Amino acid sequence: MHYGADYNPEQWPREIWPDDVRLMREAGVTMVSLGIFSWSRIQPAEGRFDWEWLDEIIGLLHEGGIRVDLATATASPPPWASAAYPEMLPRDADGSIFWPGSRQAFAPSSPVYRRLASELVTALAERYARHPAVVLWHVNNELGCHLNYDYSDSARDHFRRWLERKYASIEALNHAWGTDFWSQRYTAFDQIVPPRKAPYSINPTSVLDFKRYTSDTLLELYVMERDIIRAAGATQPITTNFMGAFPPADYWKWAAEVDVIADDNYPDPNDPESFRGAAFARELMRGLKPGVPWILTEQSTNALNWRPTNPPKAPGQMAALSAQAIGRGADGIMFFQWRQSRRGSEKFHSAMVPQAGLETRTWKEVVELGGQLAQLPDLPDVSSHARVALVFDWENWWAIGGRDHPVPLDYLALAHRWHAALHRLHLSIDIVNTTSDLSAYSLVVAPQQYLLGDEGAATLTAYVAQGGSLFVSAFSDVVDEDDAFREGGFIVGLREALGVALEDFGALVPPETLTTPDSAGETATHIEGDGPGQSEAPLDGPAGRIVGQYLAEELIVQDAEILGRFTEGRTAGRAAFTRKSFGDGHGYYLATIPDDDGMLAVLRWLAGEAGVTAEIEGLPPRVEIARRGSILTVINHGTDPVSVDVPGTDVLSGSTAVRRELGAFGWCFIDTGGVLGAR
Ligand code: GAL
C-alpha cells in the first residue's frame, strides 16, 4: 500500500529537506511523486540541465526509505521555452492565446513542445532509469486538465493528419460528416479547420471527430514519453494521473497504454452526497484495468483552494474517503501535496504538512491513517464480484453533448444519478463500456446511450441472448459512430433485443429550466393534455407510479410486452416501459428519464427481477459497502453513529463481533473469509 503525496521540494530551502524526510517517516509515507512541475529547475535553459538538486533530494529520500514516483516534469514548460518558441502556445476556439504565467501553456500537438519534452524526458530517464529509489514513472500531469481543447494552428495541422489517417480519402470524410448539407463538401484535407468559432451550429460529426482527435492527441503525448522512458532501460511501471470521468480523454482507450491506473479525486466537502460521485470514479478506475489494483495519486487532506468556497473536510472524512478507494481496489493513497505552499496559487490548498504546523487535526489524521495503512495485509484481489454493471461511454458523452438535439442532456450528470440510485440500493456495481465482457453480470444498465456503434449493439444484443437483463432508457440507440441516423428509424441496433422502435422523442420542458415557483412555492409542472409546456410524464408500471422527465418518447411496440404506460400528458395511454424476452434474457426499455425517486424505484424492481440483492440489506442511506475479494469495506459517510451487522474479522482491530459500531465517518474492513457468495 503506497502512502504519500506530490512532493515539490524546490519550493523550500534545502535545510528543510531532511526534516521533510523525517516527517514523512513519522507519517508512514512510503512514496512521493517528485518533480511534477520541476521543468524550469531541471532545465534552466535549452540544452542545459541542473541535476544536482534532484540527485540530492532523490538520494535523501532513498536513504530515508521513501520511494519515488518520478515525474517527467513536462506538465508546465518553463518561460524560456514559450519565449523562444511562441508557436507552442495553445489557442481557444476564438483564436486567443493561452499565455504563460500559469501552468500547462502548451499545445499538445506542437512539434516544438514535443521536441523539448522529448529532450527533457530522454535526459531524465537516462539519468534515473536505474536509480533504486524510483519505483514508478509519472508522465506529465493530468494531461489535458486545464486546456481541454486546443484550436491552434498546430492543432489544425495535426487534426488534418489525424483525419487523413482515419478516413484515407476525402470522399469517405464527406460521407461520414454529411457535408452535402449546408455546402460543406471538402475537396482536400487541408481545407479543414478545427471547430473554431463559427457563425452557427458546427457540423456535429466534425465536432465528435475533434473530440476523438483530442483524446488521441493527449494520449500520444503519454505514449511518446512512455516509449522514451522504456528505451532508456527503465523497468518500473509507468503511468499518468487520470481525473475520473474527465471529458476530453477516453480512458477506456487510454487504460491499455498505462501499466497501472492512477486517479486524482476531490469530492466536495460541501456536498453531503459527494461520496457517491467519488464511488463512481473509483468504480470506473477499477473497471479500466480489471484485476489490477490502481493508485489514488491525488486527493486533499483537508480544504481545497479551487472551488468557489473551500470548506474543510469533516473530522475523519479524509480517512473515510481513503477507505472507500482501498475498498474499490486502490493500492495507494496519496495527496496533493506534501507540504503546504507558502507562496503561489495553491497556498490555501491543504497538504499533509499544514502551514499551521503539526499541532493540527490535519497532521494527526495524516499520521493516524499512515499507521492504519501500514497495518493492512496485502489485498491483491480487487474483484468486486458485482452482478450489476452501469455503462459509461466517452464517445456517447461527446456525441450526446452536441447541440441541436430534442432536449439538452448532461450525460455525466445523468450517469451519476443512475449510479447514485444503484449505490443507494447498496448493490455492488462495476462500470463498463458497451463492448466490455458482460458475461458476469445479471443486470446491465445502459442509460441514454445515444451513440451506439455496431460493436456495442452486437455486444449488448448477445448479452441479452445469453441470458442477461439489459435495461435501456430514453434517447438511446439514436445514432451510429458517425452521429448519423441508421437505416430503419430509431432503436435499430438493439431492435432485436428490445422489440421496440420509436416514432418521436417527445421532448419535455427540462426540469432545470423550470424556475418559476407556483403559488404554493413549488416549481411549476404543467401537464395539460397535449398542450404546450409539459415538463413531466408520469407513468404507471411494475415499479409503481414514477415521474419521467426530459422526454416522453412515442414508442412503437413491435414484439415486446408493455409493462407500464404514461398516464398523463401528450403520451397518456402509450407504452412507457417494455420488456422483451430475447434468447435466454430480457431487454427492458423505458421511454423517459425518471426523477431520482423514479430511478430508485425502477432499478430496485429490475434488481429484483434479475435476482440481484444488496451485499447487506437494510443499511442506512449514508452507509456504503464495497467488496474487494473477501474484504467488505463498510463506511458511514454520515455524521450520526450507526451499527451494522457484518460477520467476519475486522482487518485492523481483529474484532470478530458481528455488530460493528461506526461513528461519524467511521469505517472498517471486514475479512469475510469467503463467507459471501456472489450477490
Ligand atoms: C490537481 C493537480 C495538482 C493540484 C491539485 C489541487 O488537478 O494535478 O497539481 O493542482 O489539483 O487540488
Image (tube, helix red, strand yellow):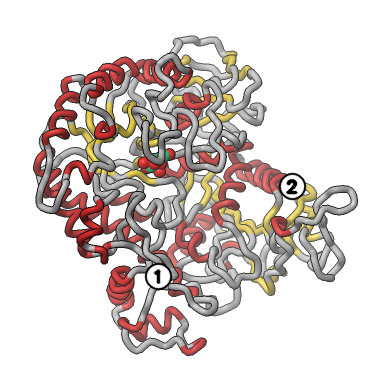
> For mark 1, what is the residue?
95
Residue 232 percent across, percent down from the top left = 10, 46
Secondary structure, mark 2, is loop
In the picture provided, is 176 more to the left or to the right than 27? right
Q: Looking at the picture, does residue 462 appear above or below residue 329?
A: below
Q: Quadrant of ligand 1?
A: top left
- Residue 554 x, y percent position in the rendering: 72, 69
Name the N-terminal-most of marks 2 and 1. 1
Q: Which quadrant would the C terminus be assigned to in this image?
A: top right
* Residue at (56, 51) in percent of width and height: 415
> Seen in the image, is 644 located left or right of residue 286?
right
| Residues at marks 2 and 1, CA–CA distance in whole angstroms | 52 Å
Q: Look at the image and tell me whether residue 613 can be seen.
A: no
Residue at horizontal 46%, vertical 35%? 384
The residue at the far right in this view is 519
In this figure, which residue is indicated by the disc labeled 2?
A: 543
Q: Is residue 290 above or below residue 372?
A: below
Q: Residue at x 46, y 63 (%)?
A: 458
> Residue placed at 18% from the left, 29% from the top?
57
Q: Can I make out residue 327 in this image?
A: yes
Q: Looking at the picture, which amino acid does disc 2 mark? A: Ala
At label 2, counting other C-alpha atoms closer than 10 Å, the crowd grade (few under 14, some 14-19, many 20 or more) is some
Residue 402 position, x and y percent, is 54, 67
| Residue 20 vs residue 185, the one in the foreground | 20
- Name the spot of residue 194 as percent of width and height, x first: 39, 73
Asked if residue 324 is positioned above or below residue 23 in the image, the reply reads: below
In the image, taking residue 601 as reference, residue 248 lies left or right, namely left
Quadrant where the N terminus is found in the figure: top left
Is residue 99 or residue 641 the one in the foreground?
A: 99
- Amino acid on which disc 1 is placed: Gly
